[in-house]
Image: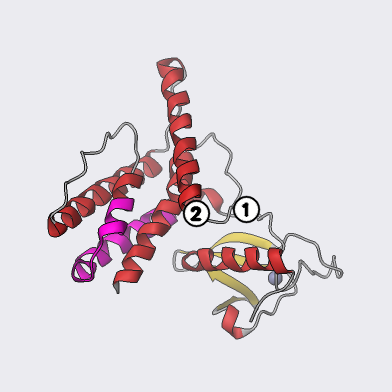
Amino acid sequence: MTLADVVADLEWVMAYWPDLIEARLPLATARRWRQPELTADARAERDAQARAERFERNALGADSPAPVDITVLQTALDVLVDADDLAAAVAEHAGLPVLPPPQYADLDAWPYLAYAAAHMTEDLADHAAPITARMVDRVARAVCMVYDGQVLDVTCPWCQGRTPETPAGGAYTWRVMSLPGDQTAIVCTGQCEPPDSDVGVWWYGQPCWPIARWTWLAKRVHQADQTGKIAS
Ligand SMILES: [Zn+2]
């Protein structure tokens, strides 16, 4: 693991954190898969949105207690504890002020993840790598419980949604599926043969992309939306 891998892990957890927090309310409908964006604007916007939602929840108060999925809540707490510890280790190492401890009622790991990502150093990366890998794994599992089986509102840029029923294309062919070995992947169910460089894993002849590649996949979809074609 390198410094870049550790920072990428932290950014990944930040991108999916809001989904995790939303997922802990089992009665909330699963939100549509969206392309993770990590621009400063997107973060600020999502942060503001999360705060607004939190305010709404607090304002609703005890009159409408939301049922909480304990597994997902525990995952969020575990990641928050790890993020707080990691941010503190990074601060100590760099001689920077330590962030105030998290308010557990807020369940907001972002400040700690962002702090750790911003000040991570090469010589701390080895210490951090197993921690950030564990965070990614936990968040992925919890978020995927929500996404499993979902058909994504995305046209596959490789097959354009061509299936035997829709030879001209246009079908939504991507599904989130749990595969053996606790892998979660997006599987294209169309007549789809991306070049080997774009797909490393096949599932009964269908291309699939494990969750670790979703950020990359989102970029390819975005690129295809912009240009109308897949760049090689
Ligand atoms: Zn396809």
Residue 156, visible in the rendered structure: no
Residue 162's place in the image compared with 30, above or below, is below
Q: Is residue 157 above or below residue 20?
A: below
Taking 161 as reference, is 49 above or below it?
A: above
In the image, the residue with mark 2 has its CB under 8 Å from the nearest atom of ligand 1: no
Residue 141 position, x and y percent, is 43, 55
How many numbered marks have been drawn onto this rendered protein structure?
2
Residue for point 32% across, 63% down: 133
Give the side of residue 86 with respect to residue 43, left or right.
left
Q: What mark, if any, has residue 206 been given in the picture? A: none
Q: Does label 1 or label 2 sit earlier along the sequence? A: 2
Secondary structure under tag 2 reads helix
Residue carrying label 2: 144
What x and y, as percent, mark residue 223?
64, 67
Left or right, 167 with respect to 98, comes to right
* 124 is within the stretch colored magenta: yes
Residue segment shown in magenta? 114-141
Report the amino acid beneath label 1.
Gln
Label 2 is placed on what type of residue? Answer: Cys
* Residue 169 counted in the magenta span: no
Marks 1 and 2, how far apart at CA: 10 Å
Seen from the viewer's position, the closer of residues 11 and 158 is 11
Q: Quadrant of the N terminus?
A: bottom left
In this rendering, the answer to whether 215 lies above or below 159 is above
Asked where in the image residue 192 lies, by quadrant, the reply is bottom right
Relative to 209, is 47 on the left or the right? left
Callout 1 secondary element: loop
The colour scheme applied to this rendered structure is: secondary structure
Seen at 55% across and 35% down, the residue is 28
Q: Which residue is mark 1?
A: 150
**Ligand 1 is in which quadrant of the figure?**
bottom right
Residue 186 can be seen, yes or no: yes
